[in-house]
Amino acid sequence: MSTNTTDNQRKVTTSRLLDMKRRNEKIAMLTAYDYSMAKLIDQAGMDVILIGDSASNVMAGNATTLPMTLDQMIYHAQCVVRGTNRALVVADLPFGSYQGNPMVALESAVRMLKESGAEAVKIEGGSEIRESIERILSAGIPVMGHLGLTPQSINKFGTYGVRAKEDAEAEKLINDAKMLEELGCFAVVLEKIPAALAAKVTAALSIPTIGIGAGSGCDGQVLVMHDMLGINEGFSPKFLRRYADLAPVIDSAVKNYIKDVKDGDFPNANEQY
Ligand code: KIV
């Protein structure tokens, strides 16, 4: 479905995403963690920019998302917000900042919005975090859910494999998705689940589903920026489409710079004062 110029410039809001689902217009979401990349992604016309706690992997070099702190997520969100005009900005609440205690969850979400300027938070889980979701929503803070492979629970799952292949887990996921909608979440990420299940959930909900490794039946798609730009070379799951191959481009540019410096070729007469 095509959109006109006015639509392309108009600020994306949570209600606009609901409208996009109703009109069958797919939602594009991508992660960003810093000002410069957020600016480029926003100017390109992205609908939603997610400050993912995947920052832990691609920015900080950790093996999991668990070490990320709320202060670190707020810092990344502040940088992204400064570079964004049009996209809806959603920030992940990190591991340990919302599970277990609804008041802690509320405080974390309030800090995120107040200190960074992000417009919504994303949190992982279903019925286990029901009270936290309710408490955050009660403060007027929009919540995006996240079901399926929820990386903050990697120590429970043991692998990053496809989730909800078995009936019992699939049924719980459907019930959790319906609960998220009933509570008032504005969207839900479905990560690494069978495409048929994601399509079923999408058809059952009036709020948009945003898939990653969940097939084409979702209302939108999300990828991690470093993965789709080919910066994160070692990571190539089946669901990932690479839209650029930047690692060799960067490697070659850096090697050329080193060579020019060593050879005394840089800077030349035109590159000095
Ligand atoms: O942290 C992240 O980048 C995410 C996306 C993969 C959905 O949660």
Image (cartoon, helix red, strand yellow):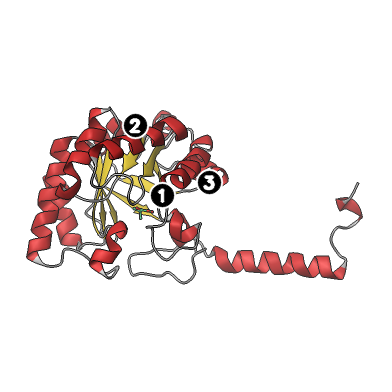
Above-or-below relation of 131 to 264 = above
Above-or-below relation of 159 to 268 = below
Left of 217 or right of it: where is 227? right
Residue beneath disc 2: 13
- How far is the residue under mark 1 from the one under mark 2? 16 Å
Q: Earlier in the sequence, mark 2 or mark 3?
A: 2
Q: Nearer the viewer, residue 99 or 168?
A: 99
Q: As shown in the figure, which amino acid type bears the numbered disc 2?
A: Thr
What is the secondary structure assignment of the residue under circle 3? loop
- How far is the residue under mark 3 from the one under mark 1? 13 Å
What is the secondary structure assignment of the residue under circle 2? loop
Dot 1 and dot 2 residues touching (CB under 8 Å): no
Q: Nearer the viewer, mark 2 or mark 3?
A: 3
The image shows residue 206 at horizontal and vertical percentages of 16, 39
Q: Quadrant of residue 50?
A: top left
Q: Quadrant of the N terminus?
A: top left
Q: Quadrant of residue 57?
A: bottom left
- How far is the residue under mark 2 from the one under mark 3? 21 Å
Dot 3 and dot 1 residues touching (CB under 8 Å): no
Residue beneath disc 1: 30
Mark 2 neighbour class, 10 Å CA radius: few under 14, some 14 to 19, many 20 or more: some
Residue beneath disc 3: 34
Q: As shown in the figure, which amino acid type bears the numbered disc 3?
A: Asp
Visible residue check, residue 44: no
